[in-house]
Image: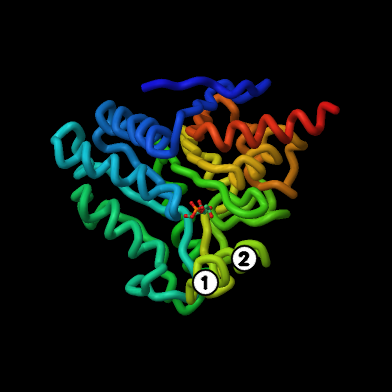
C-alpha cells in the first residue's frame, strides 16, 4: 500500500495514506498482525465514524479466516451516561454490531461500561479495576473536538483514571446539532493515564478538521489543555494512520506558524 510519513520530532510513526479507506485498512492491518502474534491480546476499542472503515476491514479479514479474534479480550474507551446500551447511539451497541458479534469475541472476554449504572463513579472505578488487572496490548483512538481522546476533554488531568466526564460544549454541539443524536452531555471514559498504560496506541484520523486537532496535539505544547498531546509523552508506543487531507491541514498550520 502506498504511504508516506509525516515528519515529527518525537513521533516517528505517523503514516499518511491517499484516502481514508487506505488509512483505515492500514490501521486494521496493525490490529490483525497483533492478534496473529498474540491470539489472547486485550484490545481497547474506540467508536465513532472514524472507526467504521477500520472495523469493516477487521470483519473482512475475520470472514476470510486471516485472523481469529475469538480468544481476544475486548475493552472500550467510553460510553454516554446515563444511556442504555440498546439505544441507537450507544457505544456498546456500536461495538456489539461492528466488533464483538462479527468478530465472534467470547462474551466472557468482553468488558463494557454500563451506561445505566446507578452510580457512575462506582461504575468507573469498577471498570478501571478491571483494566488495572489486564495488560492492554493495543488501544485504538480517534481524535475529537478540542483534541479529546476517549471523552477526556480539554483540561482533563494527564493522571486521570476511568471517570464520569462532562462533555465540552464543542462535543455536545457536534453530537446533538451536527449529528442529531439524543445523547446526554456526560459520559464514562477511560482516563488519560488509563489509556496511556496500553502497550501500543493506534490513532486514526481523516480530513481537515482532524488535521487541525492533530496540529494542536502534535505541534503545540504538551499540555492538559490538549488531551491528545499526552501521546507525545509515550512517543515510542504511538502509531498514527492519517489521510492526505489531514496531513495537508497539519502542514498548512505549520506553514502559518513559520511565517
Ligand atoms: C469514541 C471516542 C472519541 C472519538 C472522537 C472522534 O469512542 O473515544 O474520542 O474517537 O470523538 O469521533 P469520530 O470518529 O466520530 O469523529
- Left or right of residue 227: residue 89: left
Q: Residue at x 62, y 68 (%)?
A: 173
Q: Which residue is mark 2?
A: 167
Q: Residue at x 30, y 28 (%)?
A: 33
Towards the viewer: 245 or 85: 245
Tell me the colour scheme of the image. Answer: rainbow
Residue 205 position in % (x across, y down): 51, 41
Q: Earlier in the sequence, mark 2 or mark 1?
A: 1
Q: Residue at x 36, y 42 (%)?
A: 54
Q: In the displayed structure, would residue 133 be above or below residue 125? A: above
Q: Nearer the viewer, residue 257 or 117?
A: 257
Query: In terms of image quadrants, where is residue 117?
Result: bottom left
Q: Residue furthest bottom?
A: 118
Q: Position of residue 154 (x, y in %)?
A: 70, 54
Residue 159 in view: no
Q: Is residue 211 left or right of residue 180?
A: right
Q: Nearer the viewer, residue 111 or 126?
A: 111
Give the CA separation, mark 2 to mark 1: 14 Å
Contact, mark 2 vs mark 1 (Cβ under 8 Å): no
Q: Could you tell whether 25 is left or right of 222 in the image?
A: left
Q: Residue furthest right?
A: 259
Q: How many marks?
A: 2
- Label 1 belongs to which residue? 120
Q: Quadrant of the N terminus?
A: top left
In the image, residue 126 lies at what x, y percent?
45, 62
Tell me if the residue at label 1 has its CB under 8 Å from ligand 1. no
Say if residue 207 shows up in the picture.
Answer: yes
Amino acid at each position: 500500500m502506498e504511504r508516506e510519513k509525516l515528519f515529527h520530532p518525537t513521533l516517528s510513526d505517523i503514516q499518511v495514506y491517499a484516502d481514508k479507506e487506505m488509512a483505515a485498512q492500514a490501521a486494521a492491518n496493525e490490529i490483525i498482525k497483533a492478534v496473529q502474534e498474540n491470539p489472547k491480546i486485550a484490545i481497547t476499542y474506540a467508536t465513532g465514524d472514524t472507526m467504521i472503515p477500520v472495523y469493516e476491514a477487521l470483519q473482512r479479514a475475520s470472514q476470510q479466516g486471516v485472523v481469529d479474534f475469538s480468544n481476544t479480550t475486548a475493552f472500550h474507551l467510553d460510553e454516554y451516561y446515563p444511556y442504555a446500551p440498546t439505544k441507537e447511539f450507544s457505544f456498546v451497541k456500536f461495538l456489539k454490531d461492528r466488533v464483538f458479534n462479527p468478530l465472534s469475541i467470547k462474551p466472557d472476554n468482553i468488558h463494557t461500561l454500563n451506561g445505566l449504572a446507578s452510580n457512575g463513579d462506582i461504575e468507573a472505578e469498577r471498570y478501571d479495576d478491571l483494566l488495572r488487572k489486564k495488560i492492554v496490548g493495543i488501544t485504538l483512538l480517534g481524535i475529537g473536538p478540542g483534541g479529546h481522546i476517549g471523552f477526556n476533554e480539554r483540561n482533563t488531568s494527564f493522571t486521570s483514571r476511568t471517570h464520569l466526564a462532562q462533555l465540552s460544549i464543542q462535543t455536545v454541539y457536534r453530537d446533538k446539532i451536527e449529528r442529531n443524536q439524543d445523547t446526554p452531555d456526560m459520559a464514562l471514559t477511560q482516563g488519560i493515564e488509563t489509556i496511556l498504560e496500553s502497550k501500543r496506541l493506534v490513532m486514526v484520523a481523516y480530513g481537515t478538521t482532524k488535521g487541525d486537532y492533530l496540529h494542536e496535539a502534535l505541534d503545540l505544547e504538551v499540555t492538559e489543555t490538549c488531551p491528545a498531546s499526552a501521546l507525545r509523552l509515550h512517543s515510542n508506543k504511538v502509531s498514527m494512520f492519517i489521510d492526505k487531507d489531514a496531513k495537508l491541514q497539519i502542514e498548512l498550520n505549520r506553514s502559518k506558524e513559520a511565517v
